[in-house]
Amino acid sequence: MIFDIWVRLLHQVDGVLWLLQGNEVARHNLGPEAEKRGVPANRLVFAKRTAFEKSPCRGGPTVSAIAYVDEFSCAPPLERPGC
């Protein structure tokens, strides 16, 4: 399960996992699942979908990150440079 991979990574770093806030049922279930795997639920951050222009890589709110991993469905189009 992909969530297990993210949890293993969270055990190795001091940080949070940012997730797209979408399905409320999934949001409700992921916290307890993280806790079962030894990760405090407050290390899961649910962010609302925002316009590309307001994203951190385009001058929106600053986010300090060691690593940035995005999935295809949320990533900006390839023809938009600067991120």
Image (cartoon, rainbow, N blue to C red):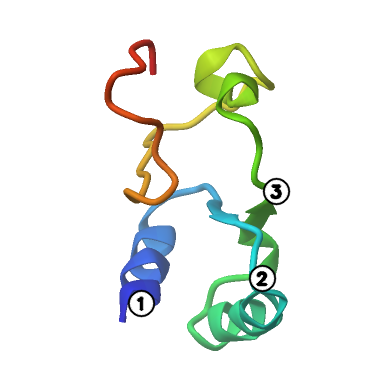
Amino acid type for the residue under numbered disc 1: Asp
Mark 1, other Cα within 10 Å: few <14 / some 14–19 / many ≥20: few
Tell me the residue that label 1 is attached to: 4
- Which numbered mark, 1 or 3, is in the foreground of this view? 3
Residue that lies at the very extreme toward the bottom in this rendered image: 36
Q: Secondary structure at mark 3?
A: loop
Q: Which mark is residue 48?
A: 3
Nearer-N-terminus badge (1/3)? 1
* Residue shown at 54% from the left, 15% from the top: 58
Nearer-N-terminus badge (2/1)? 1
Amino acid type for the residue under numbered disc 3: Lys
Amino acid type for the residue under numbered disc 2: Ala
- Which numbered mark, 3 or 2, is in the foreground of this view? 3
Q: CA distance from mark 3 to mark 2?
A: 18 Å
Mark 2, other Cα within 10 Å: few <14 / some 14–19 / many ≥20: some
Tell me the residue that label 2 is attached to: 41
Q: Position of residue 50 (x, y in %)?
A: 66, 37
**Picture quadrant where residue 12 is located:** bottom left
Q: Which mark is residue 81?
A: none
Q: CA distance from mark 1 to mark 3?
A: 23 Å
Against 9, residue 2 (above or below) is below
Q: Which quarter shows the C terminus?
A: top left
Q: Secondary structure at mark 2?
A: helix
Q: Position of residue 23 (x, y in %)?
A: 65, 73
Q: Secondary structure at mark 1?
A: helix
49 or 43, which is in the foreground? 49
